[in-house]
Structure formats: C-alpha cells, structure tokens
Image (cartoon, grey):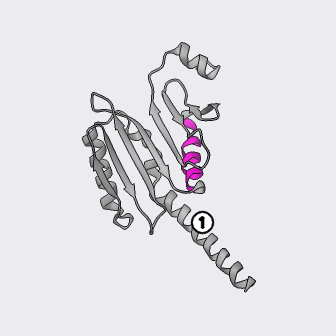
C-alpha cells in the first residue's frame, strides 16, 4: 500500500511540474503586462482577443468593464489564473493584477517579471519592488501569506520621491 501511495504522489508531482511549465509557456505575455501600459482599453482588448484566438485550448474568457478588463484562464488544461488590466480616466492602461492559485505558479510568474534586467528591479520592502526611475514601475505583493497575486503599476514619481524610496539616484 505504501508503494502505491508513493507512486501516486510521484505521479501528482510530475503532473504539477508539467502544469507549471505549461503555464510559463502559455502565459508569458500576461506576466509582462507592462507591454499594455499606455494602450487604450480597446487596444488591450484586441490584443487579448488575438491571444485567446491563437490559444484556443486555454478556454480563456474576456470580460470588459468600465475601467478594467478581466481575462480568466480556467483549468484543467492549464493552471487557473486571472489577469486584470486597469485603465485611468483617459482610458490608458496603468496597472495589471495577476492572480494565480498555487504557490509555485505565483513564484514563477513573479520571478519571470523580476528577472527582466531592463527594469533594474529593487526590493524596497517585504511587499514592494521598484523599477529603475525611467521605467516608472512598481510591483506590490500581498501583505499576507497564502495569497497568490501581485499588482504591477505604472507610476509617475518625482526624482526626489524615487531617491527616497530606493536610496539611489538613477
């Protein structure tokens, strides 16, 4: 009986690794949400519709509200994830929230974003990362553990505020 349990656990672990890899292959554009910053709601919606069309196996759904767009990617062919794109009063994309439902998927999405050297990410506290001054990006993480989301925001800070937040003058 113990061998059967071990074999089942091993099979489940291999299945989860495959799902995480599939998520990273299918969702790279969503992790790099900054590609939508500055685009209009119609432009973002069009881009996401094209992505859904190219990846029909995801069975993703798209919902447009007044000042946001919600892309939902359900299981079982991939790990479920939700992506919210938020727009300012002028209709331009200013933030993206990525929600995953497992620790390993969350870590992979976040690390993919943080490893992009062109943004020069710096951790400023336990819940925030800040990009280089010229990129003007901020990542906010949940304060509580066992929540698997992060918010990527475009910010317009002054040099003084940036220096205060990071301790560096870029």
Image location (x, y in percent) of residue 67 = 29, 37
Q: Is residue 170 left or right of residue 40?
A: right
Residue occupying image coordinates x 60% and y 56%: 104
Image location (x, y in percent) of residue 79 = 49, 62
Residue 161 lies in the magenta stretch: no
- The outermost residue toward the top is 160
Q: Is residue 84 left or right of residue 17?
A: left
Query: Quarter holding the C terminus?
Result: top right
Q: Residues within 10 Å of mark 1 (few under 14, many from 20)?
A: few
The chief SS type of the magenta part is: helix
Q: Is residue 88 left or right of residue 3?
A: left
Query: Quarter holding the N terminus?
Result: bottom right
Image location (x, y in percent) of residue 31 = 47, 47
Image location (x, y in percent) of residue 47 = 31, 48
Residue 161 is drawn in which quadrant? top right
Magenta residues (range):
105-118
Residue 126 is drawn in which quadrant? top right
**Which of the two residues, 25 or 72, is positioned nearer the viewer here?**
72
Q: Is residue 152 left or right of residue 117?
A: left
48 over 94 or under it: above or below = below
Residue occupying image coordinates x 46% and y 64%: 78
Residue named by callout 1: 17
């Amino acid at each position: 009986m113990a061998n059967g349990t071990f074999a089942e656990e091993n099979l489940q672990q291999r299945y989860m690794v495959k799902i995480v890899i599939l998520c990273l292959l299918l969702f790279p554009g969503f992790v790099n949400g900054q590609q939508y910053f500055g685009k209009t709601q119609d432009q973002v919606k069009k881009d996401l519709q094209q992505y859904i069309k190219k990846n029909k196996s995801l069975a993703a759904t798209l919902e447009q509200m007044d000042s946001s767009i919600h892309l939902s990617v359900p299981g079982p062919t991939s790990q479920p994830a939700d992506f919210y794109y938020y727009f300012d009063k002028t209709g331009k994309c200013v933030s993206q929230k990525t929600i995953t439902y497992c620790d390993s998927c969350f870590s992979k999405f976040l690390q993919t974003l943080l490893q992009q050297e062109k943004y020069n990410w710096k951790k400023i506290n336990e819940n925030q990362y800040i990009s280089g001054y010229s990129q003007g990006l901020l990542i906010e993480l949940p304060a509580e553990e066992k929540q698997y989301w992060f918010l990527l925001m475009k910010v317009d800070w002054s040099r003084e505020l940036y220096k205060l937040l990071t301790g560096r003058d870029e």
